[in-house]
Amino acid sequence: MSDSSSRNEALFQRAQRTIPGGVNSPVRAFRSVGGTPRFIERAEGARVWDADGKAYVDYVGSWGPAITGHAHPAIVEAVREAALRGLSFGAPTESEVEMAERICALLPSVEMLRLVSSGTEATMSAIRLARGFTGRDAIVKFEGCYHGHADSLLVKAGSGLLTFGNPSSGGVPADFAHHTIVLDYNDLEQVETAFKARGGEIAAIIVEPVAGNMNLVKPAPGFLEGLRRLCDEYGAVLIFDEVMTGFRVGPQGAQGLYGIVPDLTTLGKVIGGGMPVGAFGGRRDIMEKVAPLGPVYQAGTLSGSPVAVAAGLASLKLIEAPGFYAALGARTAALAAGLADAAREHGVAFSADTVGGMFGVYFSARPPASFADVMASDRERFNRFFHAMLDAGHYFAPSAFEAGFVSAAHTETDIAATVAAAREVFAKLG
Ligand code: PMP
């Protein structure tokens, strides 16, 4: 149904004439849930305002970066100050060094770090580096994990466990996909079998240590430990893709939370504080293979952008405040518990789970442990929930397959208002 008086609707119609699907990243188009995307005019704290002037309590948080809330004054001021000194130099700056030092200090597994401008660049570069370091071509990834849109990562499972994958996107040569083995998340036996058969060919395992791109799926006990063991045994590089989980699930990311030391880590989102920043880093002997020290080429005109790095540094400073993660985790857990209670009151098959400041909501009785579980949840019910919540002024991710994010700016009152709205929605979902 289109509403001719809606500016969101008018902008969406206009956008579709010059931008594919009207959006610059597919999930924004509301294809999965239907309806008109909200064009955001401004955001502050826990709230976003759309083109019709309607306010929403925001649980997307720019898909993760807005961990301190939107337009945090300290971040905005850092950006302003940096911009006044010049937008970009294409030469090194002290702030990049400070950023690298800070991240190396926060993540003990990271001895050296390179900054890039997106999560996609970070994972693409980490894969190239792992291949260059090991001299091997194959990589292992898991179904339902998203690592950005580099060719080798847009791959779905092949016809059998040990066959190489097939492209999951047009434009990816089958030859590229053949170097990617796609396995089931949380199925360590499969990984063992794959390594037994092809261990000598495998350069790296790349994994989201908490999967946040198929809703939220936690690692099963022993899964990440097993990946570490297999990589050690076969000389493969373990890459933790912490673009989403980095500084989101705790002060040392998922690696700190679960006590696993990856060889390489990719970062994005929070480390940019809302500006385009990504990073890959890890073991010194591996990172020394990156150009100009080593043979693995990687570069970027705007890498380490002084304005973006200023935002990132300000964001990192804020999250280092004592008690930051305890408060964020408690707020997020309160949301999940409140939603689950409200659903139970109305007999709706629903569950919710959290890791730090990340949450998942599922229209299934238990949180999913695998991609298959996620696919089995009631998507149609999610879509109805999503739209009813949106109408009530609560903005959840517009897809049943995305994690949600709480920020330090969400107050107890915000969470209570969202839970109260959900209670009314669940009563009608029945
Ligand atoms: N890795 C993970 C785990 C992600 O969640 C994302 C983005 N959602 C990416 C990589 C890609 O990051 P970007 O969108 O910044 O390219």
Image (cartoon, helix red, strand yellow):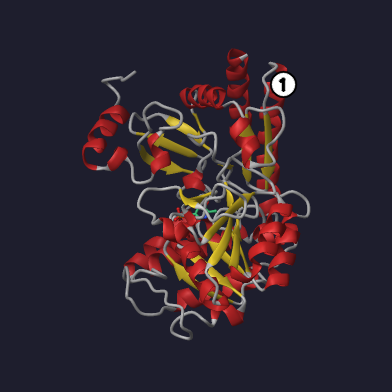
* Residue 50 placement (x, y as % from top left): 37, 34
Residue under the image location 59 percent in, 66 percent down: 204
Q: How many marks overall?
A: 1
Residue 402 visible here? yes
* Residue 353 placement (x, y as % from top left): 69, 38
Q: Is residue 165 left or right of residue 11?
A: right
Q: Is residue 229 left or right of residue 298?
A: right
* Residue 137 placement (x, y as % from top left): 52, 69
Residue 77 visible here? no
| Residue marked by disc 1 | 344
Kind of residue at badge 1: Arg
Residue under the image location 43 percent in, 54 percent down: 149
Q: Quadrant of the C terminus?
A: top right
The image quarter containing residue 172 is: bottom left
Q: Is residue 116 left or right of residue 372?
A: left
* Residue 351 placement (x, y as % from top left): 69, 30
Task: Please name whichever residue, 59 or 284, is drawn nearer the observer in this view of the structure.
Answer: 284
The image quarter containing residue 77 is: bottom left
**What secondary structure is marked by label 1?**
helix
Task: Please name whichever residue, 390 or 148, is drawn nearer the observer in this view of the structure.
Answer: 148
